[in-house]
Amino acid sequence: MKSDSAQRSPAADGAINRTLRVLTAVCEDGPLTLTALSGTTGLTPPTLLRTLRLMRDEGFVVQDEDRKWHATILVWRLGCAVNDSIGLHRITDRVLRELAEVIDETVVYATFENGWLTYSGQAEPDKPVRTHIPLGGHYGPLETRTGHAVLAWLTRAEVDKIIEAQATTAYTPHARKALYQELLDVALRGYASGTGDRWPGVWGAAAPVFNHRGQPVGAVGVSIPTGGVPDNGEAIAAKVSAAAQQLTVELGGPAERPASPLLAAAVHRRGPARAR
């Protein structure tokens, strides 16, 4: 007996491929007009419209009052079911455990949302002296290394907004300039490192994690109880950066770390030679 895939005709396979291509575009880039969808998918408007109407009849997409197509709550429900089945938290926890085993220090994952960081994952080494960061801790990105790792991939307007909303002391022009220079350095290195304002006696390194749009959604970080920079600090930071990139890819993000808007703006203003 032939399988379903063997029984399908080439035309059916083409229709399925088109449908999946359109669904992906609507979910990742929508809401989109028919013209914009045509440019994204490479399908002609008549073919695209037939596909969208079939998807609409099955409850996967809808057209709003602006004649733009977007995914429905059904797609979100399916995404939640996938999340439950493959366990995105398990992926994060696995990457953190592997990193903790390699560097033998406490590592964390901080989720970035609405301008704030929430520590949602942690792996600790089996040794008596180590740092411990409670899960669920809610912190501003200005005061931690994980926060600076995220800030370095926001736009200047987004960083300014966070400063205005969260800074506990007034940011003088000099302090703001120093912060932006540090964030540029972070963007060039690919990670933030040093002691944060919240835990002065703890050295940390952190690197950003990105979503499928190349936007920072969190950071992987390490915390080491030490009075200064560890002798192998650069090697540890490089491993943290590699783990963050691995997590980015496993969560559907880009294979290479995206360019920082801050760095791109600095290059535009000063020219390549002075930006570095």
Image (cartoon, grey):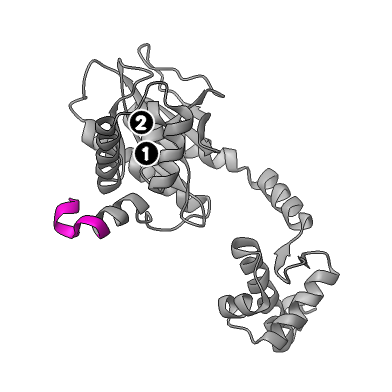
Instruction: Name the residue at 40% across, 43% down.
Output: 208
Circle 1 residue: 149
Q: Quadrant of residue 35?
A: bottom right
Prevailing secondary structure of the magenta residues: helix
Q: Is residue 124 above or below residue 17?
A: above
Instruction: Name the residue at 76% across, 59% down.
Output: 72
Tell me if label 2 and label 1 are in contact, CB under 8 Å. Answer: yes
Q: Is residue 168 above or below residue 209?
A: above
**Which residues make up the magenta segment?**
268-276
Report the number of numbered marks.
2
* Between 53 and 267, the one nearer to me in the picture: 267
Quick check: 46 left or right of 153? Answer: right
One can see residue 3 in this view: no
Crowd around label 1: few <14 · some 14–19 · many ≥20 (10 Å): many
Distance from disc 2 to disc 1, alpha carbons, whole Å, reads 6 Å
Q: Position of residue 137 (x, y in %)?
A: 53, 22
Circle 2 residue: 145
Q: Residue furthest top?
A: 128
Crowd around label 2: few <14 · some 14–19 · many ≥20 (10 Å): many
Q: Position of residue 216 (x, y in %)?
A: 46, 46
Q: Position of residue 141 (x, y in %)?
A: 43, 32
